[in-house]
Image (cartoon, rainbow, N blue to C red):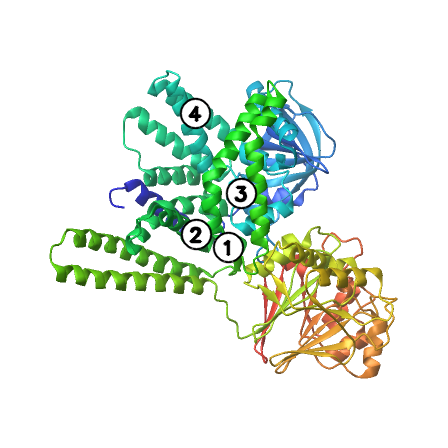
Amino acid sequence: MVRRPLCILCLLVMTGLFLLDLLSGGELVRGNPLPDQVQKWMEEQSEVTVCGVVQKSVDTEFSQSVWLKDACLICSSGRSGQEERISIKNTVVYLKEETRLPAGTTVYVSGTPQRPETARNPGGFDSRQYYACRHVYYLLKKAVVLKKSRSYSRYGQFILDFQEKCAEILEKTAGEAAPVFAAIVLGDKTGLSPELRMRYQQAGIVHILAISGLHISLLGMGLYSLLKKAGLGIWPAGMLSLTLMLQYGMMTGGSVSTMRAVCMFLLHVGARILGRIYDPMTALAAAALLLLLESPAYLYDSGFLLSFGAVLGVGTAAPALMGLLGIKNNFWKSLLSSVSVQLATLPVSLWAFGEVSLPGLLLNLLVLPSVGVVLASGVAAVLIGFFSLQAAGAAILPGRILLAVYEKLCAAVGKIPFCTWIGGQPEAWQVLAYYGILLLTLCAGNFAARIRREKDHTESPEEARNAGYILLRLKSAGCLALAGGILLLGRHPSPYLSITCLDVGQGDGIVIETPAGEHYLVDGGSSSQSSLGQYCLLPYLKSQGISRLQGIFISHTDSDHISGVLELLGFIEKGLTTLRVDCLLLPEWTEPPQAWTELAQAAQRAGVQVRTGNEGDRVLSGETVFSLLTPEAGAAGSDVNEEGMVLEISWGSFTGLLTGDIGEETESVLLEKEVLSDVDFLKVGHHGSRYSSGSAFLEKILPEVSVISCSDTNLYGHPSPETVQRLSQAGSHVEYTMKSGAVTVFTDGVRMWVKRFLD
């Protein structure tokens, strides 16, 4: 490390950025760098005018999104006609009507400003962080083009048209595999189905779907060698290959992994041109510094950390571990390189995805040597396709066969019961402890390598024997330390009972963890968010290290309570997740609706036991008791809201009440039966509807904390001001998922704490 000053500088810069960001409360690196007055003005306006230069335009299913660079806010226009412009960096505009906007066009657009959404639940995708890496701090929704320039960048538009033509050739020649080829060759992942992404992620080979160092090195070095064989010298071949690979990196989207690979390739070829020695670790540090100086927000970007961590794993961890274990066989070296990448990036993978693939260690040994064939056949098909689609179809055939094999392997992996380890997001102290253990192990590996070299040259049997004892102890201690570090990352013990009301928009989704270490889901649906299971429920469960749900309670079968549950059951049926569910508990109705039947059938197909329950039934989890207060025995299920399941949770002196979507009618029935008592926590019925949580009901239960789950854009007027007032009059502290994101209530059986995710 001392001989690599650039590596030390990179480490110091990253540490400095982290500490400064920590001291600034997360505003220096992850925050909005625009002046406070500009931010305040933007967030107060219902409509603003922005001027910028078109970088690219993408047609989506519902609108046309236009990326503008060098965007300026047009605040006013004085009598002189000169405009007052304030830079807002870059922005993304969503147009109401489709408009042809070539790259390089200067446009004036008017629309509603909106900050990108931050994650609203643990494990959720942070759009604000994603856009911050690209210097986008505001989006313009429902925008219209006021005027545009006639001039544009002919070269920039040529690149976009060329990419579009390449995608068209792949679509015509690759058949169903076209989206995968588009991702591997062009960096365009928009056509990939969610199911395919999940299969590749589960198999541990999702990285092949992104432009990475492997792609750049194969194409770049292949091009460089080809140009040299064609008779060009080192300088012409090097400069031409550098130029083309830089343009290729920009054409494929300029992702962080692509630009890291392009930077390292530039330095590699530059070293050859100048006759200098190429050091991968120095090149890696240089690439990291360039990216961080361009956008410090990359410091928290999972793509940045995984891309650079993987190279560090191969360049530093693998040699040290080989020295520790004394591995010389090529197969075991390859396997250990794969393991080293996983070890170096394990905390980042768990932080980003909550899980890691176990078969991926072996599967990568099969996939990585052959993915070059897929890439080469895709590139060849694109180039040949400009002249003959029939010949291009023949050129792409080897790649299609390999992709079919990959898909079969992914499907086979999905059938393995524990093919992924759901370890959950580690805490900061766990990450530091893990990397400390890993660093000590790598130091031990380097020390072991030195002992081996001395042992090989010693002529004393006694010294050789002592060296063998030391090596055995180092190997055992290193392996045990690494195993302990991995187990430490996945350890999430809690002595509390926790109830988490997820922000699912307009709907309900509640996850309960008992002190016995069991987990239950109560409802899981939304009428305002699509794909809730994939983008909310499953990421949350993974982030918490929850690989098994002992039960799913369904209060009633409206879509805003079951849509995500149906998704989860479908994923389990198809083998797209290792999450396991023991039991689905439905309300016991004599004439259940079609949605009830469909949900029960989905559970059966997923291998989940289906049970029904009504008033008086109980479910035990250690000392925690789940008691069903409704539905009444013999309820038909004709009114799913009023005949839904009301669940009481008790542990120690704590009592919580989950009321589904019941209204005052069912509340009156519960009051008449005298089954209600004081509660500490209330999940407010029917998303805070004015027809729920009546005065008599609240005066009886007197909840200390109440949570309302609803969307801030719902059309029902939830929560009703009258309901909020009644809750306040009952002495209840009210929390809202639409304001605070996920809201978690913790209790030790006596005391109670509230945690808001967006705090």
Q: Earlier in the sequence, mark 3 or mark 2?
A: 3
Instruction: Point out which mark residue 132 bears.
Output: 3
Q: Which residue: 27% across, 29% down?
A: 276
Which residue, as the protein is rendered here, is positioned at the far left? 460
Mark 3 → mark 1, Cα distance in angstroms: 26 Å
Residue at image mark 4: 223
Q: Which residue was labeled with disc 1? A: 356
Q: Secondary structure at mark 1?
A: strand
Cα distance between the residues tagged 1 and 2? 9 Å
The secondary element bearing badge 2 is classed as: helix
Q: Quick one: 197 or 637, which is closer to the camera?
A: 197
**Element on which disc 3 rests:** helix
Q: Is residue 292 left or right of residue 522?
A: left
Residue 371: image location, x then y, percent = 49, 38
Q: Earlier in the sequence, mark 2 or mark 4?
A: 4
Helix, strand or loop status at disc 4: helix
Give the vertical position of 667 relative to 187 (above or below).
Answer: below
Q: Are marks 2 and 4 in contact (CB under 8 Å)?
A: no
Label 1 is placed on what type of residue? Val
* Amino acid bearing label 4: Leu
Amino acid type assigned to the residue bearing label 3 in the image: Ala
> Of label 4 and label 1, which has the lower sequence position?
4
Query: What numbered label is drawn on residue 342?
Result: 2
**As shown in the figure, which amino acid type bears the numbered disc 2?**
Gln
Whichever of callouts 1 and 2 sits on the residue coming sooner in the sequence is 2
Label 1 close to label 2 by CB (< 8 Å)? yes
Q: Residues within 10 Å of mark 2 (few under 14, many from 20)?
A: many
Determine whether label 3 and label 4 are within 8 Å by CB: no
Q: Which of pointers 3 and 4 lies earlier in the amino acid sequence?
A: 3
Name the image quarter holding residue 43.
top right
